[in-house]
Image (cartoon, grey):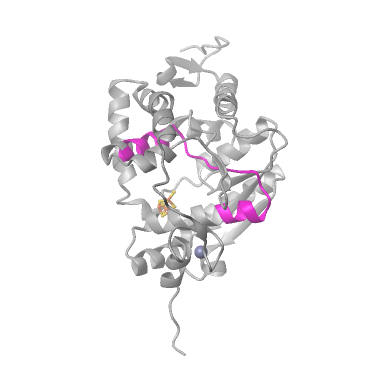
Amino acid sequence: MKCRRCKAPAVIDVRRHNAAFCSDCFLHHCREQVRRAIHEFSMFGPEDRILVAVSGGKDSLALWHLLGALGYSADGLYIGLGIGGYSEESEVRTRAFATEHGLALQVISLPEDHGYDVETAAQRTRRSPCGACGLSKRHLFNRAALDGGYDVVATGHNLDDEAAVLLGNVLHWDLDYLARQHPALPAAPGFARKVKPLYRLGEREMAAYCVLERIDYQIEECPMAAGNRHIGYKETLNDLEARSPGSKAAFLFGFLEKAHPRLASGETDDGVVLHPCPSCGAPTPGEVCAFCRLRARAIPVTAS
Ligand code: Q46
Ligand code: ZN
């Protein structure tokens, strides 16, 4: 197996591209896919202040590394979810990466700063752990970006993640979610701009990138992930991909090119009026925002 670009011995094949690469050319391929994603959707420019949502896993650390390799300066935000040893190790790796590369990192702890952890919030609000976790992370990343004067929040969602979310949204024909599923969501009042520069790269590519760049990431799966329906969607898509390489990319990129523009242009807000949450200021259609409701129910009430 030879590298498609330089004909040296290859270390990885990317069946979707019907190509194999040597180490240097594979890293070049990853940088080019991210560069293309950034330009294709005008995600940000060199003058923008970027906040990267880092979890300590392969995708977010690879993203932070790739942005630096492409000449962007980006700060990181890590949210400690209070998931025992998993969270502790994730934080250690995130801090070590930031220190090694001289990057600025902000750390928020759900238990210490907000008085609850993911498991408690899930139990008390009868949400799935990932539901409570996702709601908390979206809210806190957005707030940190607005408070810190950042232009954009970048997350490490990769091609596999996005294809799995798309499959779920299609299976449920959730048109609102489909209209909002995009690698670059513009800023709106109370909402920071959000981008996914890894949407053109698969999970396996991100793991290989970390190995080749010697990035020490959290390999353990989150113990709360069991039962997350996106895992099932990923397995289904992996079966499809094994039989027909390129299916995932065709599914996601075809949606973005052909279906999303129609969905987004037909998007109506259905008369929904957002107003600031009286407790935290986040835009919400209800009285108090979903995050503040979750937090109020998740924090144990102490007897007076
Ligand atoms: S951290 Fe949170 Fe993931 Fe764990 S609880 Fe679910 S959403 S699986 S990215
Ligand atoms: Zn609120």
Q: Is residue 62 visible?
A: yes
Q: Is residue 97 above or below residue 107?
A: above
Using the rendered view, name the quadrant where residue 29 is placed: top right
Whether 146 is among the magenta residues is: yes
Percent of width and height locating residue 137:
50, 54
The single residue placed furthest to the top in the displayed view is 7
Compared with 304, 269 (above or below) is above
Q: Is residue 253 magenta?
A: no
Magenta-drawn stretch, dominant element (helix, strand or loop): helix
Residue 270 in percent (x, y) is at 39, 47
Residue 215 in sight from this viewpoint: no
Residue 247 in picture, x, y percent from top left: 34, 23
The image quadrant of residue 107 is bottom right
Name the side, left or right, on which 99 lies relative to 130: right
The foreground one among 10 and 230 is 230
**Which residues, given as a range, are shown in magenta?**
142-169
